[in-house]
Image: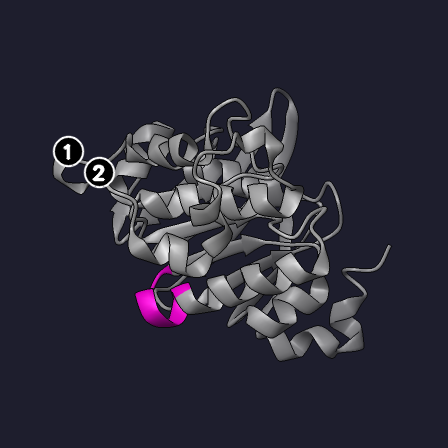
């Protein structure tokens, strides 16, 4: 579904990504790990179109994305859950979910039933303002908003950050359901090692803007792999 090939990305004169390549397949969870500041979020910004790349290629379902804008990529089927959630605090839960209608045709503008099946708390709070929800509930809302766009590729940037353990388990179950039942390709950036170990089909580790390891989740227990993740 997603192919990233030899991508370089810069912020001014500072190079954030150096020849990064990875793939994320349908029906699989691909997890990107690494210490803070190694380029994980920059990689996601490149995929969703928030930051142009200098060199390399990003393709979705075999079609090169080039310099397409984020809204055009959303129409192609890329759903994004940003770090920090970025929900609209003054809009209600229902209105936040409806912002996901933007890339859809008029006939598709409804909230899928599985959003409320995965996150029943959202159905109970449709009239509440987004800013009144807890951090964990806001994260569920951010994922639900991305699902409203009917994505083929779901991109999540540290969905467990600042979330209580019970909600982390709910989010993990939801991601696994989406992989198994919907056949989504899921690209996940995460710091929480156990979360990735339980969910990931494929793992990439980044360091200093480069991919330094590619393998399966079971490899995360190998000492030579873990050294890339310790401070």
Q: Position of residue 26 (x, y in %)?
A: 34, 64
Circle 2 sits on which residue?
Answer: 109
Numbered tag placed on residue 196 in the rendering: none
* Quadrant where the C terminus is found in the figure: bottom right
- CB atoms of marks 1 and 2 within 8 Å: yes
> What's the image's color scheme?
one colour
- Name the secondary structure under disc 1: helix
Q: Is residue 177 left or right of residue 9?
A: left
Q: Secondary structure of the magenta portion, mostly?
A: helix
- Is 181 magenta? The answer is yes
Disc 1 crowd, CA 10 A, few/some/many (<14, 14-19, 20+):
few
Q: Is residue 67 above or below residue 163?
A: above
In this rendered view, identify the residue nearer to me: 108 or 209: 108
Circle 1 sits on which residue?
Answer: 106
Q: Is residue 31 left or right of residue 160?
A: left
Q: Is residue 143 above or below residue 31?
A: above
Q: Position of residue 24 (x, y in %)?
A: 42, 60
């Amino acid at each position: 579904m997603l192919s990233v090939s030899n991508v370089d990305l810069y912020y001014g004169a500072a190079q954030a990504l150096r020849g990064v390549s990875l793939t994320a397949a349908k029906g699989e969870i691909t997890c990107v790990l690494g210490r803070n500041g190694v380029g994980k979020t920059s990689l996601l910004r490149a995929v969703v179109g928030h930051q142009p790349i200098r060199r390399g290629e990003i393709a979705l379902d075999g079609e090169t994305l080039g310099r397409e804008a984020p809204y055009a990529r959303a129409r192609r089927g890329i759903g994004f859950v940003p770090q920090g959630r970025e929900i609209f605090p003054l809009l209600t839960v229902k209105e936040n979910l409806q912002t996901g209608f933007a890339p859809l045709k008029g006939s598709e503008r409804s909230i899928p039933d599985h959003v409320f099946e995965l996150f029943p708390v959202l159905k109970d709070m449709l009239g509440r303002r987004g800013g009144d929800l807890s951090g964990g509930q806001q994260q569920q809302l951010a994922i639900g908003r991305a699902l409203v766009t009917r994505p083929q590729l779901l991109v999540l940037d540290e969905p467990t950050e600042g979330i209580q353990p019970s909600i982390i388990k709910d989010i993990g179950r939801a991601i696994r359901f989406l992989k198994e039942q919907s056949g989504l390709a899921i690209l996940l950036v995460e710091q929480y090692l156990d979360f990735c170990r339980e969910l990931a089909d494929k793992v990439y580790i980044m360091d200093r803007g480069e991919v330094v390891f590619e393998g399966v989740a079971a490899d995360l227990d190998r000492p030579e792999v873990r050294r890339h993740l310790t401070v």
